[in-house]
Image (tube, helix red, strand yellow):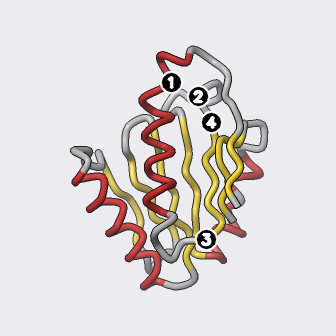
Amino acid sequence: MAEELTTTGNAADLAPGRARALLLADIISDTPARDTVVLDIHEMSPFADYFVITEGENERQLRAIERTLLEKMNENGVKARRTEGTAASGWIVLDFGEVLVHVFSTDQRTFYRLEDLWADAPTLLSIQ
């Protein structure tokens, strides 16, 4: 079930990043990912406006999520600026400018608890 909340700030400035974050979440929804959240971190972070956080059950799923995101965003004319991490490490970060996508294994997500670290950030979208 998806839940969308409103964000604060200058809507004109945030619109492209918000649209990109929601597009990334939509792409993720067509993969084996689960428990996807979009956090609006623009008031707390100098390096990104949104985090998209999701997880897969195993390395194969993490690779599939990463590959699908890169391919679908490329089809939309957007290339990742940078990718870090590997499926084997359990944490992949894809940098799409104002949006950072964190693809975790369940264990790594539990260990790093990004949602807890950024608990003050409004949740823009949550897909269970």
Give the spatial CA distance, label 4 vs label 2.
6 Å
**Type of residue at label 3?**
Arg
The quadrant the C terminus occupies is bottom right
Of the image marks 2 and 1, the number of the one nearer the N terminus:
1
Pick whichever of labels 1 and 4 is earlier in the sequence.
Answer: 1
**Residue of label 1:** 14
Residue at horizontal 71 percent and vertical 37 percent from the top: 5
The residue depicted at 39 percent of the width and 47 percent of the height is 95
Category of crowding for the residue at label 3, using alpha-carbon neighbours closer than 10 angstroms: few (below 14), some (14–19), many (at least 20): some
Disc 4 versus disc 3: distance between alpha carbons?
A: 19 Å
Q: Residues within 10 Å of mark 1 (few under 14, many from 20)?
A: some
Task: Answer with left or right where residue 73 lies relative to residue 100.
Answer: left
Residue at image mark 2: 42
Q: Residues within 10 Å of mark 2 (few under 14, many from 20)?
A: many
**CB contact under 8 Å: marks 1 and 4:** yes
Residue type at tag 4? Asp
Instruction: Name the residue that disc number 4 marks.
Output: 40
Nearer-N-terminus badge (3/2) = 3
